[in-house]
Amino acid sequence: MSEYIVTARKWRPMRFEDVAGQTHVTTTLRNAIATRRLAHAYLFSGPRGVGKTTTARLLAKSVNCLHPQDANPDNTCDNCREITEGRSFDVLEIDGASNRGVEEIRNLRESVRYAPARGQYRVYIIDEVHMLTKEAFNALLKTLEEPPSRVLFIFATTEIHKLPATILSRCQRFDFRRISIDEIMKNLRQIAQAEGLEMDSDALLLVAKRGDGSLRDAQSIFDQVISLCGRTVTYTQIVDALNIVDQELYFRVTDLIKAHDTKGALALVDELLGRGHDIRDFLSGLIEHFRNLLIAKETGATSMIETSDHYRKRYAEESRVFGMVDILRLQRFVGGTESAIRWSSQPRFKLEADLVQLVTLPQAPDVADILSRLDELKRNRIEPLASISGPPSAHNTAPKPMERKPQHAVASATKEEPGLPSQRVAGISENEVRARWDEFVAEICRQRISLGSALEGTRFLGVRGQSVLIGCATDFQISSISRHREALADIFRQLYHVSARIEGMIDAAGSEESGRNTSPPPSSAAEDHPVIAAMKRELGAEPLQ
């Protein structure tokens, strides 16, 4: 019985053309070999399983091959066979993780003095070079900058940022890319045909996606699937073999959202965990599901969606049901759940609560419709105030306190038109706030006498976004506003029917003006002050004789 060799080793590329997805690297190296413009040190960086070490071996074979063919090794001469089998004295592969000390690098510096045994170059391949210590890198610098003429260094790393700049500047750098799903599928299909295996396109796509840009990972999954399913592999078998969340489950989520079915959402979580699926895998797939809906919605095409033709058609149909704002909001919501689930001590409970909230989210209203309605409401409410000219004078008579409306009247007054949110979120009108500011202050005094007293001497400064700014003369007044911010916001909402944040800030101009005016106010003005008026009305206070 012949020895079993895993797919990643058995089908390792033997020519530069066979390296998947790295044409920008292999073409440059072949040209350098053909024109004899080889650098003395190369650095290959990129994700795992994309061909860095394989390309390094191909380069080592090409420069030492006895009969090269179009800058490719012939793979039949003695030198090529020795390098392929790992027994060449001229090509040394060093694991940077286990040979990371300065002593190992010193030994390497001693060995580079010897000439190649049989080939033209003595090649040193250091894998995971970022694992070397700082001292080891320093010991390597001089040799790396001026090596013997027949020595070639090839470094491979997955973490390029960990290499010192002094090393990077002495190497010719090549960045390897993640391999596309199409390239992985093409490679696996060729292997399956050569091995006499039957795999449909959906099964190949599923394996390629699980590889996540790494051909070696995809080939390892390929071996695992063949071991379980035999020589005929289907999509359903792979889903069961790898315990992958079936894509139908994600379409069930969107069906639950359309139906606002909370009971079905809880049943789906129970089914998900009953099958042994990982919650984070499910949420990651759900984010991708909403991404696919967004692509289909905004582009009107499905070519950018990495799935089978059957599901592409379903995404095209499903995208017509949701608006872009709805899809974005759903995607952000699931993204927040995915982040929070990592730190949750009860991930199932968190998933159940969030999924129930997800399916009950109301549909986002049309922004253009809301803006037009808000403009109409704004015109209706501000036009009666147009006759007011400028801000009220400090000596104006205090306005009458706002009459308390019956409960049913208040409800009808604050009720929004159909299709609008329960509270207005449009910009606050500074003119409207200024025109009714004394009325707002009087209402504060009526509901919170102590707060009204604390705010004596403050004035309205303006509006910034959704914040109403109050000018204060002392830090005590700012502190009072901060402590009673919610109460002030409630009173403001009752009067203006708009949500706002009340903020206090030092009013330098007001303080200087009050400092210059040292004469006491007339008695009539004092009696008309909103606080005194409220005390008269609520407590029956009388002036001292």
Image (tube, rainbow, N blue to C red):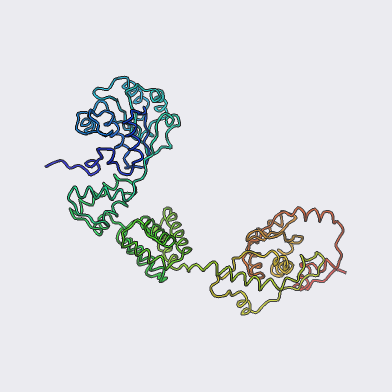
| Quadrant location of the C terminus in the rendered image | bottom right
Out of 170 and 457, give the one closest to the viewer.
170
Q: Position of residue 454 (x, y in %)?
A: 73, 61
In this view, 372 is above or below 64? below
Q: Position of residue 303 (x, y in %)?
A: 36, 57
Q: Position of residue 334 (x, y in %)?
A: 43, 59
Q: Is residue 332 left or right of residue 127?
A: right
Question: Going 19% across and 32% down the picture, which residue do you hit?
Answer: 76
In this view, 448 is above or below 478? below
Q: Residue furthest left?
A: 1
Q: How many marks?
A: 0
In this view, 80 is above or below 215? above
Q: Position of residue 407 (x, y in %)?
A: 62, 78
Rendered image quadrant of residue 82? top left
Out of 171 and 342, give the one closest to the viewer.
171
Question: Going 40% across and 30% down the picture, which residue do you hit?
Answer: 171
Out of 364 and 398, give the one closest to the viewer.
364
Q: Is residue 397 left or right of residue 485?
A: right
| Quadrant location of the N terminus in the rendered image | top left
Rendered image quadrant of residue 459? bottom right
